Image (cartoon, rainbow, N blue to C red):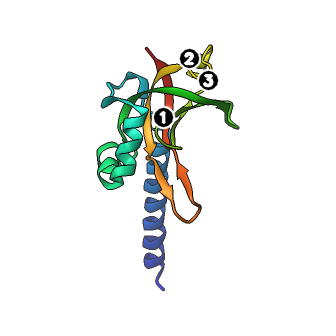
Amino acid sequence: MKKTTIKRIIIVALILVTVGGGYATYLYNMPHRDVQSVTPFVEIHADDLIKEFLNNSKVANAKYLSADGDSKVVVVKGTVGKIMEDLKGQKVIILRSTSSKIGVSSTFTKETNKSTEGVTIGDIIKIKGVIRSGAEYDEDLELYEDVIIEKSNRVG
């Protein structure tokens, strides 16, 4: 090959690496969504949210979830069935449904963990967060999967 062709290939490769690296840096440092400052899409009872996903998951997915990660922020009211802590030290509260074996699993952040203080099993509370996945029944495992809400905070 000629020296000019090699130089052009090297220049094009350097430009592509620079542009790709710049874009990756932009995505990595992009500000995270402040879920707690967003007006909720809807305030709903845990039972009703679960029923929506179980009755017609396609419609519920279209209503609440978004492929670009900008899913709906909701306020869910329900009865506390379980309180846990995940491996990251974040509190997880499961609001149990009165009509099925499924619940709404709400993961708090380290910043919002303090809002779970004083909550006990059986309390009726409201939780604001962003929906990450809907309730469903896995036929292979014969298990129900909870509605998943992240970046949660207790409200009201």
Q: In this view, does 155 lie above or below 69?
A: above
Contact between marks 3 and 1 (CB within 8 A): the answer is no
Classed neighbour count for the residue bearing mark 1: other residues with Cα under 10 Å, few (<14), some (14–19), many (≥20): few
Q: Residue at x 45, y 47 (%)?
A: 135
Contact between marks 2 and 1 (CB within 8 A): the answer is no
Labels 3 and 1: the sequence-earlier one: 1
Classed neighbour count for the residue bearing mark 3: other residues with Cα under 10 Å, few (<14), some (14–19), many (≥20): few
Q: Tell me the residue that label 3 is attached to.
A: 121
Give residue 81's position: percent from left, percent from top: 58, 30
Alpha-carbon span between mark 2 and mark 1 = 24 Å
Checking the image for residue 50, the label placed there is none
Q: Tell me the residue that label 2 is attached to.
A: 115
Could you say which is closer to the camera, residue 4 or residue 131?
A: 131
Alpha-carbon span between mark 3 and mark 2 = 15 Å
Say which of marks 3 and 2 sits in front: 3
Say which of marks 2 and 1 sits in front: 1
Q: Which residue is drawn at 50% across and 28% down?
A: 152
Regarding residue 90, the answer to whether it shows in the image is no
Q: Tell me the residue that label 1 is attached to.
A: 98
Q: Which residue is drawn at 48% across and 76% down?
A: 6
